[in-house]
Amino acid sequence: MIVDDVFAGSDKGYHVGDTVKIMDRPFRISGIVEHGKGGRKLLPIDTMGAMTDAEGKASLFYIKCDDPANENTVIQEIHNTSGLENYPVETVDAWLEEMTPDKIPGFNIALRVVTFIAVVVGFLAIFQSMYTAVLERTREIGILKSMGASKMTIVDVILRETAAMALAGVVLGIAGTFGVQLLMLHVFPTQHFEITGMWIAKGAGIAFVGAICGALYPAWMAARKDPIDALAYE
C-alpha cells in the first residue's frame, strides 16, 4: 500500500514498512507520496477489486490533462469514443461543486434551524444578563437620574456596556473557533475543516446585533425608572 504525506504525518506517525489495516486486512506501507493524488491510501486495483468482490471493475477513473485549457476537448474526445457516448465525464472542479452544502438536500435548512436556535438562545441569555444587571444597579441608575441624566443617557450607558460585552464575546468566540479547528486537525489530521471570512463576518454580525436587541428592553426599563423609587431600592 502507498499512503500520502498527510496520512503518514498524522498523530500516529506512519513510516515505510509499517502495517496498516484496511477492511480488517493488514497492508505494509511500501511508499509515501505527496498528497493530492486522489486518496490518502492507494491500493492496487486488483487487490481492491478482490476485497470488494468487484474484480475487473472500477467506479472512477482520474485523467490528468497536460493543460487545464484542454479539459473540454478531452471530455469531447471521450464522448466521441464508441461505447462512451453517455459515459458521465466531468472535471474535478465541477465534481467538487456538487459536494457543496447547496447541493445536499436539506442541509441548508438544517443549518438555518440550528443558527436560529443559537440566535434565540443568545438573545435570551443577553436579555436575562442585562435585565439582572439593571436590577442590580437600580440605585446607580437613580443617582444618575437625580443628577440630571436623561433617558437617552441611561439607554446609551446600558447599550454601550452591552456592545463592549458583545465585542469581547465575538473575539473570544472567533478565537475559540480557531482553537477547536486546531484541535480537530490534530485529532483528525486527514480531515479538512474550513473557516471562511464570510462565516466569521456572519457569526460576528448575528452575535453583535442579537446582543444589542436583547439589551434594548432592559435599557429602556432602566431609563423609565423613577429616581425616588430607584434611590429607595434595596
Image (cartoon, grey):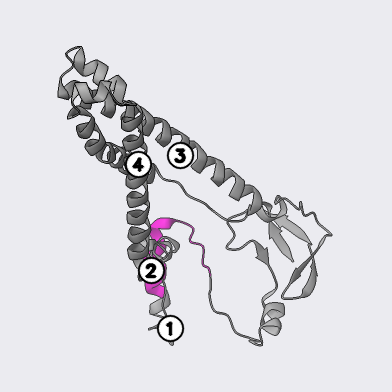
Q: Residues within 10 Å of mark 4 (few under 14, many from 20)?
A: some
Local SS, label 4: helix
Q: Earlier in the sequence, mark 2 or mark 1?
A: 1
Q: Residues within 10 Å of mark 2 (few under 14, many from 20)?
A: few
Q: CA distance from mark 3 to mark 2?
A: 28 Å
Instruction: Provide the residue designation for mark 1.
Output: 84
Q: CA distance from mark 2 to mark 1?
A: 28 Å
Local SS, label 1: loop
Q: Is residue 34 visible?
A: no
- Residue 173 image label: 3
Q: Quadrant of the C terminus?
A: top left
Q: Residue at x 51, y 62 (%)?
A: 64
Residue 233, image x, y percentages: 30, 26
Q: Main secondary structure of the magenta part?
A: helix
Q: Earlier in the sequence, mark 4 or mark 1?
A: 1
Q: Earlier in the sequence, mark 4 or mark 3?
A: 4
Quadrant assignment, res 27: bottom right
- From the viewer's perspective, is the residue at label 4 or at label 3 nearer? 4
Residue 3, image x, y percentages: 70, 60
Q: Residues within 10 Å of mark 1 (few under 14, many from 20)?
A: few
Instruction: Provide the residue designation for mark 4.
Output: 128
Exactly how many numbered labels are in the figure? 4
Q: CA distance from mark 4 to mark 1?
A: 65 Å
For the residue marked with disc 1, what is the amino acid? Leu
Q: Earlier in the sequence, mark 2 or mark 4?
A: 2
- Residue 104 image label: 2
Local SS, label 3: helix
Q: Residue at x 72, y 78 (%)?
A: 47
Question: Which span is picked out in magenta?
Answer: 62-77
Q: CA distance from mark 1 to mark 3?
A: 52 Å
